[in-house]
Image: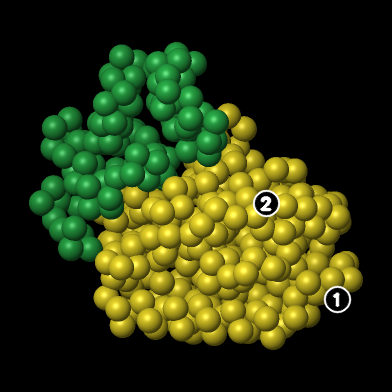
Chain colours: A green, B yellow
Amino acid sequence: MSLYSMQKFLFDLNRDPGVQALFRSAPGNVLDRYDLTREERAAIETHNIGLIYVLGANGQLLMHYAAYLGMPWPEYIAAMRNGVTQHGAVRAGIYAMTTDLNEKVANI
Amino acid sequence: MSLVFAGICSHAPGITGRAHMAEPTAVKSLHAAYRSMSEQLKASRPDALVVIAAEHFANFFMSNMPSFAIGMADRYEGPIEDPQWLGIARTSVPGNADLSRRLIQEIMQSVDIAYAEEWKFDHGIMVPLHFLTPDYDLTIVPMNINCQGPPLTPLHRAWAFGEALRRAADTCSERIAILGTGGISHWPATPDSGKINETWDREFLRSWSANNKAALLAYNDTDTYREAGQGGFEIRTFISVSAAAKGLGSVHFYQPIPIFAVGCTIATMTITE
């Protein structure tokens, strides 16, 4: 249920400007609506793309979230690689990393 | 009237959002291919364009995930993504609720679908429209096949959906164009982004062009995930176009462009009775 809740937050945020505005002004109030683990909540609060990736968020939800954060593409790719380096392999979902940690795919 | 145009194309967000990071010659060739498809589409004088897309959580989530969904509104909006990130300004796109309703009523005679009177477009629709109908002046009917949230729509049901769409289009007085959007092999939104299995792509496009139903439906998600990534699940939209058009395909452009995360594809299919 928890990964589901984290992804539901990303879904709601990514598609709804109203949620985005509220999240900017009162992020805690928004996150209180979701049944998140302490690790998931902290990852979101600190914009920790790498950990959210490792926790198993669907890549499309995560990519749109990174875009919402204004994260340039190379930083987004690097953040996911750093997440795997720090926290280990992706734990759930269908967006696991299949390339080597030091591999430069698309020269990034 | 019935179908007047059938095609497939890539919809990767990098095509518009990361164009500045790609090799300029490749970008120029891809843009020319989109322009050519746009001209073909316009020459078919369509009254509406049905876009069969694989959306990415712009409307549907695992709280209530339909195998198939069809928009039924007079206006749509998009993109949901940050416009600067995607390289496409937020806009309003015309729909036709009455046409949608008639298509839906006929399709649901043989395929169970969901309909939606509100629908936000993501890159799955906005990137193709950016090139094909840049003035957003053509009526769009959005359709979606679940390629994102497993359990995914079975391939043989995507085929049945295409057949039902064709039957529905045949009942309409309007001139209907259809477009399937998605990727073939790709590993989008991951550190693998840019990995492309060109051999797998070309084999799929051969089967698609020959409209080889047996070969297209012989793919399975386990092998596709291993050989073509989670992005390969989007072949469902291309397969539905084959079933609807019933003709033979011509691949006008195929080129892996790693920074766009996909083998960029532009193809059309003849329409056969």
Mark sitting on residue A10: none
Q: Name the residue under label 1.
A: B1
Vertical side of B198 occupied by B66: above or below:
above
> Residue B184: image x %, image y %?
43, 65
Of residues B59 and B225, the one nearer the viewer is B59
Q: Mark 1 lies on which chain?
A: B
> Residue B107: image x %, image y %?
79, 55
| Mark 2: secondary structure | strand
Q: Can residue A48 be spotted in the picture? A: yes
Circle 1: is it few (<14), some (14-19), or many (20+) Cα within 10 Å? few
Q: Identify residue type, mark 1.
A: Met
Which residue is pictured at 34% across the width and 15% down the height?
A37
> Residue B181: image x %, image y %?
54, 64
Which residue is pictured at 74% across the width and 57% down the height?
B95
| Mark 1: secondary structure | loop
Circle 2: is it few (<14), some (14-19), or many (20+) Cα within 10 Å? many
Which residue is pictured at 52% across the width and 46% down the height?
B80
| Quarter of the rendering occupied by the C terminus of chain B | bottom right
Quadrant assignment, res B174: bottom right
Q: Mark 2 points at which residue?
A: B76
Quadrant assignment, res B142: bottom right
The disc, 2 or 1, on the residue closer to the chain's N-terminal end is: 1
- In the rendered structure, the answer to whether residue B115 lies left or right of residue A29 reads right
- In the rendered structure, the answer to whether residue B79 lies left or right of residue A66 reads right
Task: Kindly indicate whether the residue at mark 1 contacts the one at mark 2 (C-beta within 8 angstroms).
Answer: no
Q: Which of marks 2 and 1 is in front?
A: 2
Q: Which chain carries label 2?
A: B
> Residue B64: image x %, image y %?
62, 32
